Image (spheres, rainbow, N blue to C red):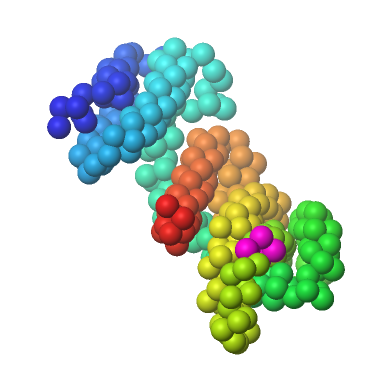
Amino acid sequence: MKRKLVRFNTLLWVVLLAVQFLPDRTEKDALSPAMVWFVVGAGVFMTLLALRIKTAEGLQLHVDVFCAIFACLIAWTLATAKWNLMRESLFPAPGQVFTQMAEDYSKIFINIGSSLGIIAQGFVLGAVIAIPLGLFFGESARFGKAAGYIAVFLGAIPPVVYIPYGIALLPTFRSVSVFVIFLATFWPTLASTMSGVAHIERRVLDSARVLNVNRPTMLFRIVLPASLPSIFNGLGIGLTISFILLTSAEMIGSKAGMGYYVRYYSDFGDYTRTVVGIIIIGIVITAIMYGFNRLQRRLLRWRG
């Protein structure tokens, strides 16, 4: 247990906690007591997480991640609340940001729900349509090459350029956003699925044909599992692009979502809430990508 708890991240945690008791030099209240409670909570969470880790590799990753987090918080606290090296109106102290985050939790959850709802609709719709089409075109000797060139051409066009047509043809901004996310997911997933099918060993397919396997079984029981690594590459690209496009779109014309939250308060010069929005966006995207990668590893565990 001592090996898990007494590490360099623990030292940085102690330094971060000690820094909070230095005198504040900001004109506004830096809310250092609130930051003290946050640091204590972070230390408890770090300890409980370390006790659950069973491998040396996982423990080292745990140490590195918390070292980076605590080092950034130490630098942020010193540069703002303690030494006042940056403009207070643009760069609020950590205590102010985390206190505002706690006060705005209801607004934050509503906007997160709006953003994730759009992502889920567009991403799932794009994946559900692209994967079967990619399997069909990738396995088809007649249509495969032509479909591949079309996918590469249309996939190279940024989906954001379709927003004017989406606004003209679709009834709401939400439907336009779903359409853009659909395009951002559809083309890379289609191209990656076709590429995955093309790289399957031909002897596997020939063996299935010798056994008179019907076409649906061939596609979904043989071709699909063999193509999953490539499919996940396309889905990962589509998911990353989707978050970028959605946040940008919400900052332009939406009335909800985390992009809207950041843009709305930045228009009023409320940079404390602006920083809150930036941090929440980073946390949400990191959590979703972590879950996506866990799902990928689970489904592809047969690769070793």
The image quarter containing residue 254 is bottom right
**Image coordinates for residue 8, horizontal then vertical, percent:** 30, 21
**Image coordinates for residue 149, horizontal then vertical, percent:** 83, 62
Residue at horizontal 53 percent and vertical 26 percent from the top? 91
Q: Indicate whether residue 84 is drawn in magenta.
A: no
Left or right position of 65 against 246: left
Q: Mainly helix, strand or loop, the magenta region?
A: loop
Residue 104 visible from this viewpoint: yes
Residue 124 visible from this viewpoint: no
Q: Which residues are magenta?
A: 197-201
**Image coordinates for residue 136, horizontal then vertical, percent:** 69, 76
The image quarter containing residue 100 is top left
Q: Quadrant of the N terminus?
A: top left
In the image, 270 versus 83, the foreground residue is 83
Q: Say above or below: 54 vs 237.
A: above
Left or right position of 231 against 301: right
Residue at horizontal 49 percent and vertical 28 percent from the top? 92
Residue at horizontal 57 percent and vertical 27 percent from the top? 90
Left or right position of 283 against 260: left
Residue at horizontal 37 percent and vertical 34 percent from the top? 61
